[in-house]
Image: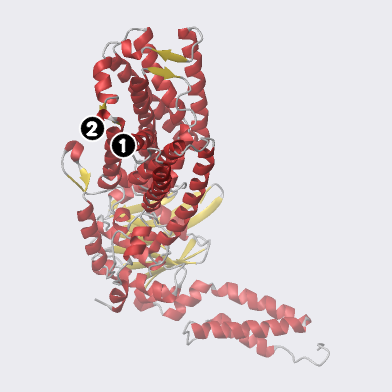
Amino acid sequence: MSAIATERMVRANPLRRLLIRPETGAVVGSIAVWIFFAIIGVAQNNGFVSSRGTSSWLSVSAELAILAVPVALLMIGGEFDLSVGSMVGASGMIIAILSTQFGLNIWAAIVVALIFAVLVGTLNGYLVMRTRLPSFIVTLGTGYILLGTTTGVTSLVTNGLTVVNGIDQVPGYSSAHAIFATALGGGQQYPIEIVWALALVTLATWLLLGTSFGNWIFGVGGDANAARNTGVPVTRVKILLFIGTALGACLLAIIQDVTFTNADVLRGVGSEFYAIVAAVVGGVLLTGGYGSAIGAMFGALVFGIVEEGIVFAGIDANWYKAFIGLILLLAVLLNSYVRKLALEARR
Amino acid sequence: MNTQTASLIEVQSVSKIFGSVIALKDISMKVNAGEVMCLLGDNGAGKSTLIKILSGVHQPSEGRYLFEGKEMHFSSPRDALGMGIATVYQDLAMIPLMGISRNFFLGTEPTKGWGPFRRFDVSHANRVTREELAKMGIQVRETTQPVGTLSGGERQSVAIARAVYFGAKVLILDEPTAALGVKEAGVVLRYIAQARARGLGVVFITHNPHHAYPIGDHFTILNRGSSYGTFAKSEISREELTAMMAGGEALEELSHELAEFAHTDEKARAALEAAAHEFGAAAEQLHVEQLPPAFEEAERRHDELPSVDGDGKR
């Protein structure tokens, strides 16, 4: 070993290694906000730290995580999807209308919604790759088209309604309820969507870190051109990621349809931004190429804890968005600092 | 020049014409296994066009391109890569935020397992990356550290190691030392020597004769789209190479012009003196013992100038 070798063998500072992990900020952040609201909770004895309180913020977080984790993968791949919010409403309505108005078995309606999601994701990805326009704009457009069409079609089919009820009356509901909406744990407090969210995070993490496809996601997000030069099928990877976000939205719609036994065309509106914020708070870089699914999950946890914490503390819920905005800004600052640290010459 | 065994790659009187511009005219060169062919030329000499022909991006307008003695018509860089002709471009096709081993195997990840459980064999990737880099004499602290933390020379070396590992027979290196400091450039030159020792044919593109001379076995010098010819190391000295590279005529022209000015303007005389001084200093820096003829010509003209009186008039 030459002189250069010894110079290179300096151990990395373990603290620094922990700091440059994408999800560190969100883990610390979610613990911090939990402690904050737990202190208030104990002082007010408001039930935040009880099983009921825990279940409520876990439930909110899980629903957001189901959206945010696929969105995080897409963002690591260098693209945005602003149509996921409309996608929740659209696929929820497809299931509701097909099952309540046309008498389809709910499982058949779910399959139709999933196929629809694959089509929408493919269309989004194809449009973005074909036009080379920013995905931000393309999916904003497809999102509005989806929202408008869903509202229009629902209104036509139901004579002017925007909410379709009665999903619990359709064939196949009880088995669907068992899989998508049952409650678990002692006292049946914890909705099964928490398990769905955890399964999704596990799958996404395995995909990202354990497969070739995951390597390609980092590659296309870091530098699509370089990735293409080394033989990564960039277009295919990105289209698959868009299909993933649409499927995530569809899964959330299924869970909500079965849980609430109704569908609302406006359900999910605005959540595309929450998903992006959760991913960014979770350490995903807005420019792509860096981030983790676990980070997005913790980003969603920050959301859930803050949202429910404010409710439990009896603070006016209008403050919620101000709080989230502040956390977003802090997270973005932290992320850009972490990236600088990650790319800094070895110390 | 003729050898019994076919060269790895050879171009015979190739030309490339873009519209009305003749980018390359009648270029012939060849690269043998275990040899470094240096392709030298100033900006605009046609180096990039020639690389693009060699790497399959462009088709020659005229002339033949032989790979291991057989005529080739590549329609894309992928074809050339498939034959083992790997090009390491200046931008390196590496992703700064990704780890070294993830970059190393990007697009050709090793997998283990079966069916839906087939997964990226991360430990294999890390081990191979570490081994391949060690063969090139690079020790990395962690193969997971982002490529962005490596220096320019190390990144070049990783790119070279990657091309070698994936079965390159010919390595085309586009100005690998251009943006590097002296030490870093030395490191890259050593890796080029390593690749040659492993039996690869290397095409080393540069405009720096001081990087080319120590490593090159043959030198092809391009100037304005045509070739000054190919020289074996034994046929050409470092000084001749430098002079040819600098474009002797251009310097001569410059000294003419400066001399013209000097006849009318005292300031130009000072400029000429400064320029001559600079040339001298540059030559010293470059360890050129013998100045190219152009320098001597410039000095002679300078000495011949009439002396100047106090008013700046002659």
User: Picture quarter containing residue A174?
Assistant: top left
Query: Residue A186 shows which numbered tag?
Result: 2
Q: Residue at x 27, y 65 (%)?
A: B133
Q: Position of residue B266 (x, y in %)?
A: 76, 84
Residue A340 showing in the rendered view:
yes
- The disc numbered 2 marks a residue on which chain? A
Residue type, numbered disc 1? Ser
Residue type, numbered disc 2? Gly
Which residue is at the front of the view, B24 or A92? A92
Above or below B271: residue A102:
above
Above or below B88: residue A247:
above
Q: Position of residue A240 (x, y in %)?
A: 35, 34
Residue B34 showing in the rendered view:
no
Q: Quadrant of the N terminus of chain A?
A: bottom left
Q: Position of residue A77 (x, y in %)?
A: 39, 43
Gap in angstroms between the C-alphas marked 1 and 2: 9 Å
- The disc numbered 1 marks a residue on which chain? A
User: Picture quarter containing residue A3?
Assistant: bottom left
Q: Are marks 1 and 2 in contact (CB under 8 Å)?
A: yes
Q: Position of residue A265 (x, y in %)?
A: 46, 20
Q: Residue at x 28, y 54 (%)?
A: B84
Which residue is at the front of the view, B194 or A295? A295
SS at mark 2 in the image:
helix
Q: Which residue is mark 1?
A: A51
